[in-house]
Amino acid sequence: MEKKNIDWGSLGFNYIATDKRYVSNFKNGAWDEGALIDDPTITMTECAGVLQYSQSVFEGLKAYTTEDGSIVCFRPDLNASRMADSARRLEMPPFPEDRFVEAVKQVVAANEAWVPPYGSGATLYIRPFMFGSDAVIGVKPATEYQFRILVTPVGPYFKGGAKPISIKIADYDRAAPRGTGHIKAGLNYAMSLHAIVEAHKQGFAENLYPDSATRTKVEETGGANIIFIKGNKFVTVGSPTILPSITRRSLEYVAEKYLGLEVEERDVPLTELPEFDEAGLCGTAAVISPVGKITNGDQEICFPSGMEKMGPTIQKLYDTLTGIQMGRIEAPEGWICKIK
């Protein structure tokens, strides 16, 4: 299929409406068969559960054109599982995990012309989401839901691509203990918007949130998990209130099995930050964005890797994971889902 006439290398991380999207509705206790549709608009009652009580969850993954010209996506079964967990936490009916993966395949194949070519630096971002769609005026779960998947071609999440970014310790809390920080719900991201706007005004790319209970330990940023390098150690944060990033879990495996690093998932005190050699934010959108500097009030923590390029270990992690995704490096079994 002929590709769309797009300057793929100039794409930002913005929405572009594509040809098809997938829709399925939950009513009378069951999901319907679902279908690909053309219309990107959504019509619903003014009293819909999502509008009144923010009953919505979402996911994010990508489709790639590999070196041999195939179109694939990366570990969609884990997105299906995480979305089901998110739905259960908000008293929403989980969309069946096998149907989730099949729907991803359908909508990507239907938008083949929008999948960026290999080597362009762009990818097709896949956004599954689900929301309460029927009228709810009392504080209770909706009884009807809509599950949708949209896709859109995107460039790098952070401007400048892989150039190191500067972040700050947030003045706000991201998630309460025993709250919803571990699920991918829209409400978690809504509360971060004011904080990120303030950070941008101050010249920072992101906020790094400490734990809300003691504000002494690193948790995650508004849109990504954080990783650290200390010598031969790959360090990630272990906490029940952060989102279990699929990218982070994949990087942990790559660090140990491909690069021979020692992997630690543990508490990371703020006081330990100056001891690390490298740091990076990881997630579906950015893969890894290197962090060159963290500001904590009057304290500036500058990593030895600097502000000009990725540190050497994070560069190896990035190259290995993207090499797996693009088909240049052999993937672990089950990681790559071939679509075409």
Image (cartoon, rainbow, N blue to C red):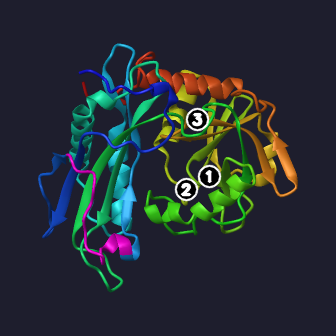
Please rate how many residues cluster around mark 3, counting C-alpha atoms within 10 Å: few if below 14, some from 14 to 19, many from 20: many
Q: Name the spot of residue 172 as percent of width and height, x first.
A: 68, 66
Where is the C terminus found, in terms of image quarters? Answer: top left
Question: Relative to the observer, which residue lies in front, 225 or 49?
Answer: 49
Amino acid carrying label 2: it is Ile
Instruction: Tell me where residue 198 sits by quadrant.
Output: bottom right
Q: Which of marks 1 and 3 is nearer the N terminus?
A: 1
Q: What element carries label 2?
A: loop
Identify the magenta region. Answer: 38-51
Place residue 325 in its image quadrant: top left
Image quadrant of residue 242? Answer: bottom right
Residue at point 38%, 51% (across, down): 82
Which residue is under mark 1? 221
Q: Name the dominant secondary structure of the magenta segment.
A: loop
Marker disc for residue 242: 2
Q: Which residue lies furthest to the front in this view?
A: 5
Between the C-alphas of marks 2 and 3, the distance is: 17 Å
Mark 1 crowdedness (10 Å alpha carbons): few <14, some 14-19, many ≥20 = many
Q: Nearer the viewer, residue 93 or 234?
A: 93
